[in-house]
Image (tube, coloured by chain):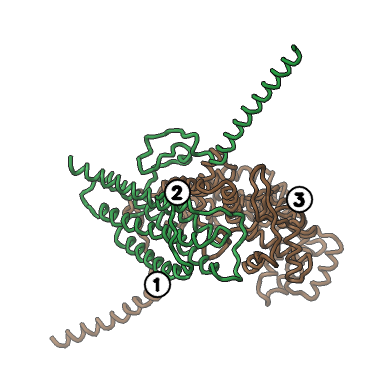
Chain colours: A green, B brown
Amino acid sequence: MPVDWGADMGKDECKTMLDALNKVTACYRHLVSALGSTSDSQNLREELKKTRKKAQELAVANRTKLTALLKDKSISNDDRAEYERLWVLFTSSMEILEVDMKRSLEIGQSFPLKVPTRHFIQTGMTGSTTTVAARAMSVQNMKYEADASIDTADLKDLETEIAQVDQMMEEMEMKVQVAPWAVEAKQEAGAELKSTVSVGNSSVGVISVCEEEPKEGGEGEAGLMKVFAGIIFTAVLLIAGILGYLVINL
Amino acid sequence: MERVIVSMQDPDMGMKMRNQRLLITVIPHAMTGRDIVDWLIQKYTITEEEALHIGNFLVKYGYIYPLKEPRNLCLKQDETPYRFQTPYYWTSTRWPASELDYAIYLAKKNIRKQGELIEYEKECYNALHKRINHTWDFVVMQAREQLRASKQRRKADRIVLECQEQAYWLINRPPVSRYSDVMLYMWCLPLKNKLCMFVWVCSFVKYCEQYQDHDPIMQGCLPSNPWITDDIMYWNMNSETVTMPTKLRVERWSFSFMELLNDPLGRKELLTYLEKEFSAENLCFWQACEEVRHGEASKIAAKVDEVYKQFLAPGASRWVNIDSKTMEKTLEGIKHPHRFVLDDAQMHIYFLMKKDSYPRYLKSELYKNLLAKAIVPQETKKSVFPFMRRQRHSSPSPALVTQTAEDNGKAKPSAAKANAGTASQI
């Protein structure tokens, strides 16, 4: 039936957009935690700015879509429950994003880039955050085109954007009447151990035990190295054994 | 504290940094405890003790975290390595650690450790799962995404990230202290403080454990909390003159002698028991002393006189057994009676009862029977339909009541007058 198909499309679209917003929120948080430390740099500030703008675009798109879906009175109760669950996901994402934006403003103001007497905190992190930002922006490589005064100029933009986000969240609360505590989560405790398929694709039915992803990538690397070392060691032993045997016999 | 940390970063005058070696990876920006203390002494020209004190604060508030034993949050003045915490994780009242963030952290740890969380972390995880169940989908999604984001960094940075986050949560959600953990934290204190702390902490923990079941906020109130449901059955059941007390009330009498004496019903029960043991005069004497202490000033002399005649005079009807020294002192004091003249004697009798009669009472048949018969009230079922619940009415204000009485009073004569008026008109 055309109506149901349209509703399903709407749901899937929503879930994909929410997944994207979730990804960008996580990356943004990662970038903000590097502010003020030795990984801080002009590039980081630019990455923050771009990630933030992307997050806002996604947020606005999500909000429009979800409000339209929730305002529709003709949807079934199941659909409504599902949309409310997506709404709670959306608001939680926005909460985290808002806090991170405010914190990045605070830390950005305390640690300006070009002041010679201010030093970054030596936290032990020395690598760059390019790859994280590339993941957030869904590109292969990041291009940096900002000028030197990005930190001060960006902060003003950041203030206005925070105000916008605040306003948007207030409007959302007024317009959409969803009781967050009434929503039941689909995942049970410990669900993160089971499948690594994103929630958007109704993971209730999919329980695939993924061995590689949950383990830390570093451990995987070290494991591989250990395997190689073991192979080489046994090969050397074998060769030594054979040579010894030959020497004794000849 | 933040200024101290920032000034430590100065490349010329700041802290001397070393490298931390972990198997294959080398992570820079580590420092030893001794270096920190030396730097503080030099920079601020303070004594070693003060520097150690400041250093301890820096660790306890999360600006510096230890690398070897992360749970031991104190500054040790030796080769133990420490590292600076990134500004995002600095303790701040503006950005308190939220439950959502903690849930995401625990979910991440769960994935990394393949479900092998420590005991208290498992408890927190389950508690959070119940509390913020509505956003649990978000927690799982965000945990996975944050792990994927951190995989983009190189290995050394990833290790640092994990250590940083762990240090942050150890400070903001410390594990529940049992005796052994308390010992660990107190290791840094000087000896005399340690002893006092230890004694105090032990007694406090014991008190909390004992009273936890009796706290209406922690355990809930049976049958129901009157302030919430407007049902005063709880107060009725626990009033002074009830025939059968509640089980919790009777249990509380066994916690300390003071609990038993403070409860009027308990006092009555104790009196009954003591009458059987022929030592009821102790309790009566104690009660009479209390009346002297807390009663009207004008009646003190009369009361003291009565107490003397009844309890203290040689050959009195209810003579109490006090040692000779206290008796002498009290008899001297009675000549000039004041509120606290019977204090020594009362204290003596109190301790006598506490050491002797009280333990025997707790073991007696009387107490055990009462405990067995005591009622455990049923929790009132909360009705499912909101409109079936009793509506809360605020009681009418006394001002209104008197007003209506006045109005009634006024209305009658005016009605009479009106009637008379109409009658006269007709």
Q: Mark 2, mark 3: which one is toward the viewer?
A: 2
Q: Nearer the viewer, residue B289 or A236?
A: A236
Which of the marked residues, 3 or 1, is nearer the chain's N terminus?
3
| Mark 1 or mark 2, whichever is nearer to me | 2
- Mark 2 sits on what residue? B142
Q: Amino acid at mark 2?
A: Gln
Q: Are marks 2 and 3 in contact (CB under 8 Å)?
A: no
SS class, disc 1: loop
Please say whether residue B254 is visible from this viewpoint. Answer: no
Above or below, B374 against B235 in this view is: above
The single residue placed furthest to the top in the displayed view is: A249
**Is B334 on the left or on the right of A208, as rendered?**
right
Q: What chain letter is assigned to the residue under label 3?
A: B
CA gap between label 2 and label 3 equals 63 Å
Q: Which residue is mark 3?
A: B356
Report, in whole angstroms, how far the alpha carbon at label 1 lies from the one at label 2.
53 Å
In terms of sequence position, does the residue under pointer 2 or pointer 3 come before the other?
2
CA separation in Å, label 3 and label 1? 52 Å
Q: Secondary structure at mark 3?
A: helix
Q: Identify residue for label 1.
A: B397
